[in-house]
Image (cartoon, grey):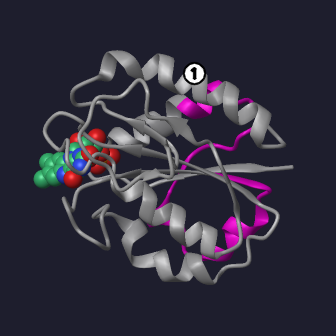
Amino acid sequence: MTVGIYFATTTGKTEDIAERIHGLLDGAESPKDMSDVDDLSELSNHDGIICGIPTWNTGADSERSGTAWDTILDEIGELNLTGKKVAIFGLGDSSTYTENYCDAMEELHRYFQQAGATMVGYVSTNDYTFDESKSVVGSTFCGLPLDEDSESDMTDARISQWATQLKGEMPGL
Ligand SMILES: Cc1cc2nc3c(=O)[nH]c(=O)nc-3n(C[C@H](O)[C@H](O)[C@H](O)COP(=O)(O)O)c2cc1C
């Protein structure tokens, strides 16, 4: 069983969190920047995939992250990831961008679902303060939202709780 961690970033925060999550998960491989992945089929080599994505294109319907993820969404949707577990974490700012908090997670979530992956790592909205997020799917976030701009003091607890949750949801961790 292998679990890969993949991220894309503009100012480095999503990479930092990917490293911190990696430190909590013995079974996961070292995080890789999507900009350095030439052949997307490498995703299919894992049994589990953890993906980190920031939101930059505020309010956009598509290409919400402003990173390397945006250019490969269609390709992700065309992979066959049936039987694979995929979890997403997102970076955003719930204070300044409270109407669009971590919107990009939902876009990535949708394309992985299209590829047949089993999505895990959903998180309750209870401990968050924000007005709107496209990443609320049904009654929960479709991944783990993190806010290093306004709530960085909450990050350690959030990622540690999420790591525990993933250990129960993703074989290989
Ligand atoms: C111009 C700009 C637009 C942003 N738009 C959003 C947004 O729509 N929603 C959100 O939650 N965060 C938004 N953010 C906050 C970033 O997502 C946040 O700073 C994140 O940690 C950046 O991650 P990165 O360093 O990995 O690129 C925006 C930040 C800037 C500077």
- Between 32 and 162, the one nearer to me in the picture: 162
Mark count:
1
| 1 in magenta | no
In the rendered view, does 96 fall on the left or right side of 37? Answer: left
Give the quadrant of residue 15. top left
- The segment highlighted magenta reads 21-49
> Is residue 11 visible in the rendered structure shown here?
no
Q: Amino acid at mark 1?
A: Ser
> Is residue 70 visible in the rendered structure shown here?
yes
Q: Position of residue 5 (x, y in %)?
A: 60, 48
Classify 80 as above or below 56: below
- Between 130 and 112, the one nearer to me in the picture: 130
The residue furthest right is 1
Q: Residues within 10 Å of mark 1 (few under 14, many from 20)?
A: some
Q: Is mark 1 within 8 Å of ligand 1?
A: no
Q: Residue at x 52, y 68 (%)?
A: 110
The residue furthest front is 139
Q: Position of residue 148 (x, y in %)?
A: 29, 30
- Between 162 and 42, the one nearer to me in the picture: 162
In the rendered view, does 52 fall on the left or right side of 67? Answer: right
Give the quadrant of residue 64. bottom left
In the rendered image, which quarter contains the C terminus? top right
Q: Residue at x 43, y 34 (%)?
A: 125
Q: Residue at x 43, y 65 (%)?
A: 107
Classify 7 as above or below 154: below
Q: Which residue is mark 1?
A: 160
Q: Position of residue 37 (x, y in %)?
A: 54, 68
| 22 in magenta | yes
Classify 108 as above or below 96: below
The secondary structure type at the circle numbered 1 is helix
